[in-house]
Amino acid sequence: MEKSKRLLLKYKRSFRRRLPPIQSGDQIDYRNMSLISRFISEQGKILSRRINRLTLKQQRLITIAIKQARILSLLPFLNNEKQFERRESTARATGLRTRNK
């Protein structure tokens, strides 16, 4: 019995509550790019609520702000810079091959 109580106390001590990603003073707005950029993946996708650790209301507001920023061209819809560079380099290589023949 004593061992089980020790284990429970040990687990309770090691549990650490994470800080919320959005502080009470932060305003969720399409102009607040430093806040919005934390909730977008490298590919430009909106991260899920489970990953962000947001409440439902916060996730809705973040989604609306990101979509508004995309429409106003403050954010790209997709971030395909690496893919674009690869396609461009392959197009150049194939273009050179056809010209040499």
Image: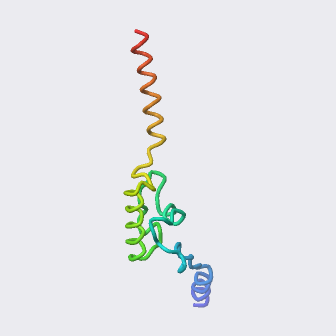
x then y, percent, for residue 71: 37, 57
The residue furthest top is 101
Residue 63: quarter of image = bottom left
The residue furthest front is 72
x then y, percent, for residue 77: 39, 52
Relative horizontal placement of residue 57, taking residue 22 as reference (left or right): left
x 44%, y 17%: residue: 96
Does residue 68 lie above or below 23 as drawn?
A: above
Relative horizontal placement of residue 56, taking residue 12 as reference (left or right): left
Count the marks: 0
x then y, percent, for residue 61: 40, 72
Screen quadrant of the C terminus: top left
Considering depth in this image, is 71 or 37 the residue closer to the camera?
A: 71
x 44%, y 44%: residue: 80
Considering depth in this image, is 78 or 30 the residue closer to the camera?
A: 30
Does residue 60 lie above or below 41 as drawn?
A: below
Screen quadrant of the N terminus: bottom right
Relative horizontal placement of residue 75, taking residue 4 as reference (left or right): left
x 50%, y 60%: residue: 37
x then y, percent, for residue 54: 45, 73
x 41%, y 20%: residue: 95
Does residue 15 lie above or below 70 as drawn?
A: below
